[in-house]
């Protein structure tokens, strides 16, 4: 089972990285497109994807709370890749400084550490997800706290996009 989880994580990461230039096509899909953008952007493990910039732009075109909800939900499902990498027991990040900094937070604060780390824009949340998987944090706990943090972050990006476009439109008039 762990080997299958590791294989799934590697396969998802390679696939998403290979289609990174086509992600903009999801914008035409509205809220389901926002969901898939966030899912794909967050499913990569340790490889950057352009998700938040697109969420910012979508916040200017759609209702920002709807964008936050769709992106937060998609992002949470995408973050399962890091959790599964840790759960598989095959995570190579266990020997890195970043992992050694984040692991005690996850061990001590559990879901609250996951919420904070997923709510702030940072490239290290994959490491937190891996730490949660290694610590065998219950999947339900991981998903609930990740969703809360993702919803906060994505809604703030969508609101920023919404208000900056409105401000720009008023400035031009």
Image: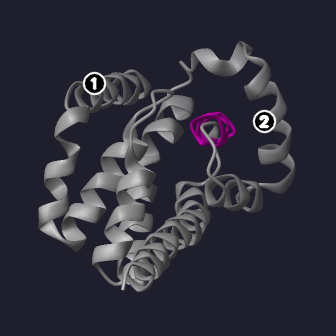
Q: Would you say the residues marked 1 and 2 are in contact, meaning their CB atoms lie under 8 Å apart?
A: no
Q: Residue at x 52, y 40 (%)?
A: 83
User: Can you say whether 109 is above or below 129 in the image?
Assistant: below
**Can you tell which quarter of the image residue 3 is in?**
top left
Residue 131 among magenta residues = yes
Write the start and end of the magenta stretch as one range.
125-135
**Residue closest to the eye, 165 or 83:** 165
- Residue at the location (57% across, 37% down)? 126
Numbered badge on residue 23: none
Residue 16 at x, y percent in the picture: 27, 33
Q: Is residue 116 magenta?
A: no
Question: Which residue is more in the foreground, 101 or 51?
Answer: 51
144 up-or-down from 87: above or below: below
Q: Position of residue 143 (x, y in %)?
A: 52, 61
Left or right, residue 150 beside residue 118: left
In the rendered image, the quadrant that contains the C terminus is: bottom left
- What residue would you read off at disc 1? 11
Q: Of all residues shown, which one is farthest toward the front?
A: 173
Element under label 1?
A: helix
Q: Nearer the viewer, residue 94 or 20?
A: 20
User: The N terminus lies in which quarter of the figure?
Assistant: top left
Residue under numbered circle 2 = 103
Residue 137 horizontal/vertical position (percent): 65, 49
């Amino acid at each position: 089972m762990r080997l299958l989880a590791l294989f799934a994580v590697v396969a998802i990461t390679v696939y998403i990285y290979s289609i990174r230039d086509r992600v903009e096509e999801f914008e035409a899909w509205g809220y389901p497109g926002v969901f898939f953008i966030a899912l794909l952007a967050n499913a990569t493990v340790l490889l950057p994807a352009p998700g938040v910039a697109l969420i910012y732009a979508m916040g200017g075109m759609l209702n920002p709370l709807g964008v936050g909800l769709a992106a937060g939900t998609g992002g949470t499902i995408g973050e399962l890749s890091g959790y599964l990498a840790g759960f598989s027991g095959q995570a190579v990040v266990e020997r890195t400084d970043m992992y050694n900094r984040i692991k005690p937070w996850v061990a001590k604060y559990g879901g609250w550490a996951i919420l904070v780390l997923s709510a702030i824009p940072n490239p290290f949340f994959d490491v937190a997800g891996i730490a949660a998987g290694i610590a065998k944090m219950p999947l339900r706990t991981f998903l609930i706290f990740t969703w809360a943090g993702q919803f906060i972050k994505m809604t703030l990006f969508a609101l920023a996009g919404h208000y900056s476009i409105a401000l720009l439109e008023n400035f031009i008039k």
